[in-house]
Image (cartoon, rainbow, N blue to C red):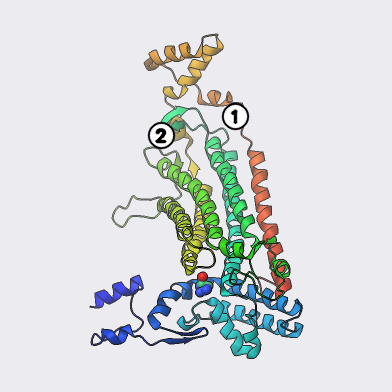
Amino acid sequence: RAWRRVAARRLDIRPLRPHSGKSLEKNMSMAARRTIVGRIDGEILKFTAGDDIKLDLELVEADCIGSAAHATMLSRMKPPVLTPAEARRIVAALVSVMKAHRAGRFRIRLEDQDVHLAVELRLTAMLGDLGRRLHTGRSRNDQVATDLRLYGKAELLGVIEEASLLAESLLDMAARHLKTPMAGRTHLQPAMPATVGLWASAYAESLLDDLEVVAAAYRLNDRNVLGSAAGYGVPLAVDRVLTCRLLGFERPVRNVLHACHTRGKNESVILAALAQLMLTLSRLAEDIIIFVMPEFGYFEYPKEYGTGSSIMPQKVNPDAAELVRAKAAVVAQQAAMACEITRGLPAGYNRDLQEIKKPFMEGLASTRASLRVMTRLVRGLKPNETALRAGFGAGVFATDMALRLVSQGVPFREAYRRVKERLPELKAMDPDEAIAMRTHLGGPARLDIGGMRAAAGEWKKFARTRLERYHAAVSNLLGVKYPQLE
Ligand code: ARG
């Protein structure tokens, strides 16, 4: 019994009131609850509110900011719904809700269903009838879509900054080990002379590519959907250009129904971009896991980043890298989940979209955590030059030998055959010399570390300037310095 109750609690499938056992019936007719939008059966309420009661706590700030823009707009449209003084009172009350939330004094109860109604109730408790006028001309549909875009905006700028910091750490490693030999592999088998610099900066360039995908997602996300209401607009002169400016979005989504339809699609685009970043991270993690194996010993894994074993005293396991690899699979699935949930929806809002909130938030959080963890790992990795040089068997130079014959006029296919026939006699070359000869664009002896560093710096600037601009817009809107709220 007790075990079953624990299991049910974990799966969050327990009934609202644990039933006594004598009357399942009574439990089935679980009392309807009074909510702001009418009476709702208890079981249905719990099921439909779902995780929102917890997840929406992440959206309190965004929700208050969105409401501040809406209230301000209501006071400036023609004819105005609120006086400027009324809008100011609402905005001040919203700021106090944000402060209460930060102090841990804001709850979302089941009866509230979500953050939107919880904030509205709180405002009404503070402002009376004025609180009841805030929802004029908007719907929870455009409200939650706005919240997710504001939330996504700040998170994506964090992602961009953290990914450029990781790229910079890889470039630092590449610069420190520009000439440190490292056998290049194909099929995991030794293949060609290469360097730690080539290896590390390859992952840096991959991150720079991924950032272009993330920035495309950022641009699509940076559009205002507020004022689209339930997806069909309203018979009031709501000013969507004004709320766009107040919230610091780049431009409004043009069509109100499309604004509604971008919910789900927007999250899936963002998650797909994150999945690309995670793909890069996962392969980097896999390399680290292999190259810190004692059998390779190419890199020394920092002891403090390893987790020990409970039984084997000698262990320093690269669990952190392994979890990044696993999270890459999870984020790819979260992207797929967002697509799948959105795929079959008919035109207009559908509650299915709510189910995307969790993978969206978790995907952002685990990508950011992975970026930060990989930055630490990369900064802590110590290449072991002796082990790296020991990885150069004679075979690694076979192609160089064949090309040496080519330079003496032998056709390549013939040179290839000659080297292959005498493989056992093949002598190792000097790795440094072999590396120094690879001077063409992007080769181990001609890496554009500076160019990549400049690109990473641009991305950092991209993130910082946009975050500053966003904070300036919100500070202006709230009349207090944001994010400090002072
Ligand atoms: N929690 C809901 C969501 O995430 C809010 C919107 C509810 N809208 C509605 N028409 N039931 O989608």
Question: Which residue is found at the position 58% from the left and 47% from the top?
Answer: 167
| Rendering coords of residue 24 (x, y %) | 27, 84
Question: Which residue is found at the position 57% from the left and 43% from the top?
Answer: 204
* 480 or 355: nearer the viewer: 355
Which residue is the site of mark 2?
A: 188
Residue 46 visible in the shown view: yes
Q: Quadrant of the N terminus?
A: bottom left
| Rendering coords of residue 173 (x, y %) | 56, 42
Which residue is the site of mark 1?
A: 445
| Rendering coords of residue 127 (x, y %) | 64, 89
| Amino acid type at mark 2 | Leu
> Mark 1 vs ligand 1: CB under 8 Å?
no
Is residue 130 found left or right of 400 in the rendered image? right
Q: Residue furthest top?
A: 409
> Mark 2 vs ligand 1: CB under 8 Å?
no
| Amino acid type at mark 1 | Ala
* 139 or 310: nearer the viewer: 139
Give the quadrant of residue 258.
bottom right
Question: Which residue is found at the position 56% from the left and 59% from the top?
Answer: 266
Mark 2 crowdedness (10 Å alpha carbons): few <14, some 14-19, many ≥20: few
Question: What kind of element bears circle 1?
Answer: loop
Work out whether 458 lies above or below 189.
below
Question: What kind of element bears circle 2?
Answer: loop
Work out whether 236 lies above or below 354.
below
